[in-house]
Image: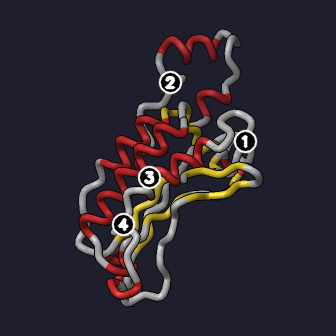
Amino acid sequence: MWGNIATGVGFDAAVEFAPDWRTLDSFLFRSPMFLQAIKWGLLPPLYQQQSITTYERLVRRMLAKPDVPYVRFRCATPGFDNSARRTEKGAAVYVGSTPERYGQWLSSLVQKTVARRAGDERIVFINAWNEWGEGNHLEPDRRFGLGFLKATFQALAILPVPSVADSKSLIQPRLRKLRCGSNVIGS
């Protein structure tokens, strides 16, 4: 649908947003047991008003999206929890994100993109670098340290490093190591 709209108004491509809200289902805290606990006052009603599901399910649903007849740039996210901004209801929370799960997702998107796209259409988006208010950030934190940056580096390490003669672009990926403060990732 969005690709038809995008190409219909002259755009060359569409960018997928991760998480895609349409993938929300199988909510946690909605079973009869939890509903009864809310009714008895053992859990606040807020649990029923928020959309809480697992990160693993998000990844599976996002990867299972069918191919589309237009250029769609894929997107991964290291996590997502916008409950800080939606305190009353309507928050989307994905629990269980780890650098390993994120890295597997991103690696899959990179491999599929390299196999299916050429040239300047080999783009994968990441949501986001430092969106702390929505629980999705690549920046180092106390829980995982450099884990998400390392996972990103490892997912991109499969990419070949083309020579200038092999490419029409002046922009050359030269990702062999990544420096974050005094920490170095890669060789």
Q: Is residue 185 left or right of residue 84?
A: left
Amino acid residing under circle 2: Arg
As helix, strand or loop, the secondary structure at mark 2 comes to loop
Horizontal side of 10 relative to 173 (left or right) equals left
Q: CA distance from mark 2 to mark 4?
A: 46 Å
Labelled pair 2, 3 in contact (Cβ < 8 Å): no
For label 1, the crowd category at 10 Å Cα-Cα, with few meaning under 14, some 14 to 19 and many 20 or more, is few
Q: Nearer the viewer, residue 104 or 32?
A: 104
Residue pointed to by mark 3: 155
> Disc 2 to disc 3, how far (Cα)?
35 Å
Give x and y (percent) for residue 108: 35, 51
x and y percentages locating residue 83 in the rendered image:
69, 41
Looking at the rendered structure, the secondary structure element under dot 1 is loop
Say which residue label 2 marks: 30
User: Relative to residue 177, is residue 101 drawn left or right?
Assistant: left
- Please tell me which of labels 2 and 4 falls first in the chain: 2
Per the image, the residue denoted by label 4 is 160
Q: Which residue is mark 1?
A: 141
Q: Compute the Cα span from label 3 to label 1.
A: 20 Å
| Scheme of image coloration | secondary structure
- Asked if marks 3 and 4 touch (Cβ < 8 Å), the reply is no
Corner quadrant of residue 164: bottom left
**If the image is split into quadrants, where does the N terminus sit?**
bottom left
10 Å crowding of disc 3: few (<14), some (14-19), many (20+): many
